[in-house]
Image (spheres, rainbow, N blue to C red):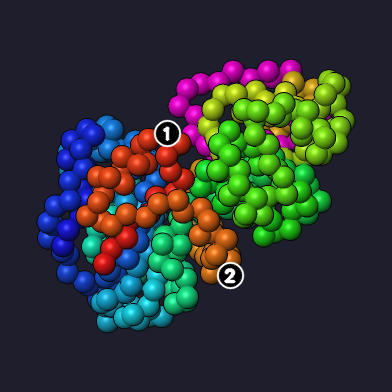
Amino acid sequence: MRAAIITAPQQVDIVDVQATSVGPADILVKIRACGICGSDTLYISIGGLPPRQGCMPIGHEPAGEVVEVGAEVRDIAVGDRVVVNPMAVADDIIGNGGSTGALAEYLLITNAVRGRSVEVIPDHVPYQVAALNEPMAVALHAVNQVAPRHGDQVLVFGAGPIGLGITIALKSRGVQHVVVADILPDRLEKALKVGADAVINSAEEDLAARLIDLHGEGDSMWPNRAGTDVFLDAAGVPAVLDTALGVAKRGAKLGIVAVHKEPISLDLMNVMSNELTIVGSMGYPNEIFEVTKDIVDNWEKYRVIISHTFDFDDLDEALRCVSTPGAADKVVITFD
C-alpha cells in the first residue's frame, strides 16, 4: 500500500510500504479521508519525532471503510464507515510518532473495540466531514474544561478549525451568547454560519469596547471590564491573552487550547484581584467519540469548517496550502 512518510526535515514522500496482516482482534480500514493538522506541519519541519526521525508515518484525522475484520472482533462489520481514535494505543499513537499513520491507503487497527478505538457512523455523513472527528474532539474538550453554563456569555479568539469547533460545541450545549474574534473576514463569516451570535474583527475594531457593547460591563476593581463569563484562546498569539486578561471581569474563566511556543508573562495581581481562573486543555481524554453524535446530527454545519480538499496524489500541493498563512482553514485529503 502507499503511505505518506516523513523522510527528512521538510520532506514527505508517498512510498510503498508493506501492509500488515490482520490478526483475530484487528480490523483493516480503507482510508477515505484524512485531515491535515498543524502538528503534521511541525513534525515535517523537524523531520519526524524520535525514534522515527527520517521514517515517520503521518496523519491522525482519518475516516474510512472497514474492509477486513478479525474473527474475535465484535460490533464492527465489513462495510462499516468509521472514525478512529488515534490515541487508543497509548504507546503507539497513530500519526504522532507511532508505527502507523492515517495518511495512507489502509490503516490497521489493532485490538479493535467499538467505542474505544473506532466508532461507526451512518452512511449520510460524508467522509470528509467525518474526518473532522479528531480535531472536533479537541475543541469539545476545551469547552468541557471551562464548563460553560447555559446563561454564560463567551468570547472565542480565533476562527480557525478549532475555534469554529468550539463555537459549534458551545451552541450545541445551549450557551446563551457566543462571540468570535479574528482578523480574517472570511473566517468571521464562517463563524456566523456555524452559529456565532456576533463576531469582532480585531484588526478593525476596538475589541474591548465592542465586547462591552455586546456583553455589558462586568464587575471588577478595574475599569472597562466586559460582562463576558468565559474566554477561549484558539488563536495562540500573546496579544490574545493580554486582551482577554485586560477585559476580564471578576470571576471570569480563560481556557487555553491553542499552542503557545514561547513563554508569556502574566499580571498576577490582575489574576488575584479579579479571582480569574486559567484552564489548560490538551487533546481529548474522553471526547473522541462524544463529539461523533453531534457531527452526525449537524454534519452540514461542520462541513463549513473545510476549506480545501486534495487527492492523496496531490499531497505536496495540500501541504503547501496548509503551510501558507491565511491560505486555508481545514484541509482534507481524499482517497479513491
Task: Determine contact: label 1, label 2, CB under 8 Å.
Answer: no
- Residue span colored magenta: 248-269
Q: What quarter of the picture does the N terminus occupy?
A: bottom left
Q: CA distance from mark 1 to mark 2?
A: 32 Å
Image coordinates of residue 260 in percent, x first then y, are: 49, 29
Amino acid type of the residue that numbered disc 1 sits on in the rendered structure = Pro
Circle 2 SS class: helix
Q: Which mark is residue 135?
A: none
Instruction: Tell us which disc is closer to us: 1 or 2.
Output: 1
Image coordinates of residue 60 in percent, x first then y, are: 36, 53
Q: Which residue is mark 1?
A: 325
First in sequence, mark 1 or 2: give its number: 2
Residue 310 or residue 279, whichever sits in front: 310
Q: Residues within 10 Å of mark 2 (few under 14, many from 20)?
A: few
User: Residue at 41% across / 80% down in the picture?
Assistant: 75
Circle 1 SS class: loop
User: Residue at 40% across / 52% down in the picture?
Assistant: 308
Q: How many numbered badges does the structure rendering display?
A: 2
- Can residue 6 be seen at all in this image of the molecule? yes
User: Residue at 62% across / 27% down in the picture?
Assistant: 203
